[in-house]
Amino acid sequence: ICGGWQSSKSDSSGVSNSGESSKESSRCSTPVLDADRTDRLRDKMKRRIESGDHWFSLEFFPPRTASGAVNLISRFDRMGSGGPLFIDVTWHPAGDPGSDKETSSMMIASTAVNYCGLESVLHLTCCNQTKEKITAHLNKAKRLGLKNIMALRGDPIGEDWVEEDGGFNYATDLVKHIRCEFDDYFDICVAGYPTGHPEAESYDNDLRHLKEKVDAGAHFIVTQLFFRAETFLRFVKNCRAIGITCPILPGIFPIQGYHSLRQLVKLSKLEVPEEIMQVIEPIKDNDAAIRSYGIQQAVEMCKVLLASGEVPGLHFYTLNREVATIEVLRQLGLWAEDPRRPLPWAVSAHPKRKVEDVRPIFWASRPKSYIYRTQDWDDFPNGRWGNSSSPAFGELTDYYLFYLKSKSPKEALLQMWGEELMNEGSVYEVFTNYITGQTNPSGHKVMCLPWNDDPLAPETNLLKDELEKVNRRGILTINSQPNINGKPSSDPIVGWGPAGGYVFQKAYLEFFTSSENVTALLQVLKKYEPRVNYHIVNVQGKNITNAHEMQPNAVTWGIFPGREIIQPTVVDPVSFMYWKDEAFALWIEQWAKLYEDESPSRMIIQYIHDNYFLVNLVDNDFPLDSCLWQCTREDMPRQY
Amino acid sequence: ICGGWQSSKSDSSGVSNSGESSKESSRCSTPVLDADRTDRLRDKMKRRIESGDHWFSLEFFPPRTASGAVNLISRFDRMGSGGPLFIDVTWHPAGDPGSDKETSSMMIASTAVNYCGLESVLHLTCCNQTKEKITAHLNKAKRLGLKNIMALRGDPIGEDWVEEDGGFNYATDLVKHIRCEFDDYFDICVAGYPTGHPEAESYDNDLRHLKEKVDAGAHFIVTQLFFRAETFLRFVKNCRAIGITCPILPGIFPIQGYHSLRQLVKLSKLEVPEEIMQVIEPIKDNDAAIRSYGIQQAVEMCKVLLASGEVPGLHFYTLNREVATIEVLRQLGLWAEDPRRPLPWAVSAHPKRKVEDVRPIFWASRPKSYIYRTQDWDDFPNGRWGNSSSPAFGELTDYYLFYLKSKSPKEALLQMWGEELMNEGSVYEVFTNYITGQTNPSGHKVMCLPWNDDPLAPETNLLKDELEKVNRRGILTINSQPNINGKPSSDPIVGWGPAGGYVFQKAYLEFFTSSENVTALLQVLKKYEPRVNYHIVNVQGKNITNAHEMQPNAVTWGIFPGREIIQPTVVDPVSFMYWKDEAFALWIEQWAKLYEDESPSRMIIQYIHDNYFLVNLVDNDFPLDSCLWQCTREDMPRQY
């Protein structure tokens, strides 16, 4: 995995896969509570080894393009369901890996940790690097919330490499440097070579090098790929014999194609066993057959490895592809697809955010935006999102990071949201079509809205019929949740948190609507005092509310065995005013700007932005059927 | 109420009454949330005046004996149900009023605030006092959580009193001093004389003095008693005419006896109107008739006062008696008997404890002990009783304050708990009789236990039958609550908190039992993992638990409109170890020591203390019927 191995992967492109691991931390214990220091990767491994619970991990390389990064990151999100213990991101010295570029190793790993909540290992190579540069990289990684480093030598540049005095010549030097400069802060992984490093004098000599790396302070070993289980098992036996006691994770490479295999073999100087070549050569032009064989071969080998009792977890070289790896994991029964969530929203894996267990509901469909806007907070609310816990949010203009932008190209957005808008009613139709999932007159489905990157959540689907009705009337909904009166925490749609608990929700509805509708709504709401709390605000900040100005309203909470109550989602009056700016800005930034200046379509969106109100409603009487539909339907004139 | 008036009351003795007012603060708004600065007495008055909600207040004098203090304080507790806006405690210069004696004005007022949760006004007289002494009294009052002072001149000592240069000669000097030294910290009350102060040169001159007191910084006026409504109403009119705008509260004195009335008249130099004397003289030997007339006369006068629109609240001179005052208030419809509680336990009125909204369940029947043991805490848990919120508890040996002792004399305790114990079974019988309310073989009811000063709470009564069964088997219960799955916050038995909410509980059971029973119990509990959490500990601190060592388990919580979830009662593992010391000590201090050294009875209690375990059980599955009875009955051998 060090050296040439990296180059062999960087010629693969595009498709990628990932997994989620912050969930893992809550599997065996309560989330949130555990101090981050007992939650280190080494501790997680220790617990899993003790409980005999096999894990897997996934290796990715940084994408080459910004759109590749958007794809990779949205896959990180999607694939959290598989439950990897960690992912790792390789280090590409030629690609400015420590920079702030959206495609750098550093930024991809940071995104995996902060935005996707994945326990992540950042590779770092030391060859031809000054100590100062390495220390700067490590400081930056620490600042970004990365806690794990894979310490590698990397490829010498040029053919005639000679050792430098006082420089980094071996991975051991890097391990020592990390432990010297950062004490015990980082968990350190090093590479093992089951058949010996290609440049090593001998297999035994290479084993001694590995022992040195571990003795210098590494916490676990991931091996180069291999093709036979016995290769790895002999290697482990030899490692144990010379006193290496840390976890040794086999690197698994499901063969995915004839040419990639040949190139890999050439670069890594590995030999493909005769029995494999005999199978592959006859089918070398049949990609599907080779992939199928690769999966079967990997599954068989992994079964032997796991059965040996020597292998606590499997490390997959994914080549940023997902099909083969997931299939192998599925057949091994390791792909979790665990619907359980520690909290209703994805927990960031940044150590600073470990205590965070409550968020405003407003960013429910834009969690990355929330994380970005609160990234400079020193403290995160722990149990209460009280008035003291709402420091200023980051500037709105700062957060248009590439991965916060819509993933769809402009043309696709116009097809969904209308090449030409006739009036406000055209906008109502877009919202309605998004809810119903039906095609619009031009034959396209509305798969996203500026406030919702993804199709309707399963939970929101419960409200589909009612949402359709109100959107047709110009109640343009962007966020909602049904009331829940004590469903088991294991409920596949609304459940979250540890087993044996119960979850609850107050019904919530958030929408844009015209000032005429607001006037009618306020009349109706008088009938629902104090059952319904509302906040109504326009882009200028004119604010109408019957709620306490500082008091958050808990709208999602859970009761669990042996612990305090968790209230992870609140309607918070202070943060609503920050969200308001973002929600209104999305009309212009993501929708109006699709159209030319002064065009009627643009002016319609601009009109809505300037004149509509953003409204949120909470029905406090959660054991009863939600009254929010009556509130929004009664007496409301249908306008288009 | 100043001067001779105090002496006139201090000859009354014994019986006393009181009221509760911390509840008031939650009546119009949410508890806990409001910062203490908006919760000052002047603000409460302002809100009540604005809403047209008449209030009453109650004046007491300090008791002369320790047992009188115990009685007065237990009445403070009991009478909170009436809902006074505040109580006030008079200042007796001759009785060491600022001392730490249990009968001092300072300590009685402090107890009312801290332990009984009553908004309290401490009287303070300045005559013949140095500024330093006065400042010291005020500092002490502030430290003890008192926020309100009634500033009075007091009686000059000796006949030939002359003004002192630079000393305090008038109440105005004291008001100025308080404002000068303590800025706006204290709410200040001053006395008004509807017929003029007996020593004043003239009625008009006295009015001008009153204006000076108010201008110096007083916030409201309480008047000397009077016998005709028009006396007070003319006084108010005259006050307003010279620019006194603050609230003026009439002092109401229900006539309670012929002799006390005569003595009062003599000391206060008031004239009893002819129409009253004409009624009283003929019945002067019929106490009941005079009291009945006194009540009727007070009610009629109060009705006129309230109807005038000039009177926002009534101030009662109770003479530490309760019957007449309560009857007058009942007839006026001002006696609240409001079953609503802001939290399931009585909130302390100390400003520092205002944010406290969670407590361990263990002290549920000993709330004063909890307040005492946590009095030196700088912070009180606000929403979470997390691991960071458990500073050391006060020393066990420090808290045997007089009012924490059982109120019953030794002889009564022996009658209830047994003159002579035969074996452990005798103890089981005592517990069983306490639960059932039946008389024991010697014909006495068990009205209290060392861990329970009062008879069974209405809520615990719901569990009576089950409790009886387990106590007969040696499961000696000292604390329990039923599970509650979403009852309205207005429920008369288990409800608490603002209107429109829902309250919940997990079933809880706490008891002492033998080590044999613990062994059997642990077997049974295996069947209820992880549904039931337990802590089992003996006096040496041997601790068996399946709960997280730092994580509190919320066992009472409430969901309310427009706010965060409140979880006011928890089972907290850290505080349980402090409670354990107290719970075991009560066996010895309150029970064993009733018997002679080396007596068999004493040795039986000592044996239980040394060998039994203290157990608490939580059934986490609150929507289901409690399984704690099965846990404690199954397989448990009946021992006696």
Image (spheres, coloured by chain):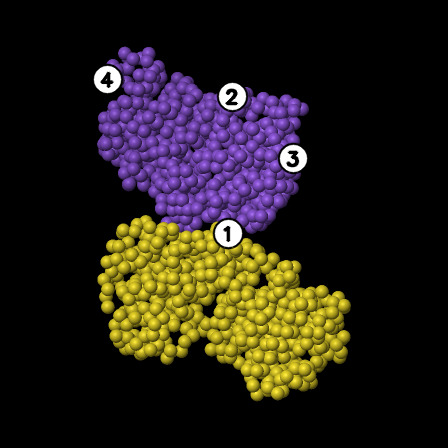
Chain colours: A yellow, B purple
Give the vertical position of A245 relative to B107 (above or below): below
Residue B156: x %, y % from top left: 40, 22
- Disc 1 from disc 3: Cα separation: 33 Å
Residue that carries the numbered disc 3 in the rendered image: B611
Residue A633 in sight here: yes
Residue that carries the numbered disc 1 in the rendered image: A560
Residue B152 in sight here: no
User: Label 2 amino acid?
Assistant: Gly
- From the viewer's side, name the closer residue of B396 and B129: B396
Q: Chain of mark 2?
A: B
* Residue beneath the point at 35% across and 59% down: A509
- Disc 4 from disc 1: Cα separation: 70 Å
Q: Earlier in the sequence, mark 3 or mark 4?
A: 4
Which marked residue is nearer to the observer: mark 4 or mark 1? Answer: 1
Tell whether label 1 touches label 2 (CB within 8 Å): no
Task: Pick the quarter of the image with the C terminus of chain A.
Answer: bottom left
Residue A428: x %, y % from top left: 29, 69
- Disc 2 from disc 3: Cα separation: 30 Å
SS under mark 1: loop
Residue B372: x %, y % from top left: 52, 36
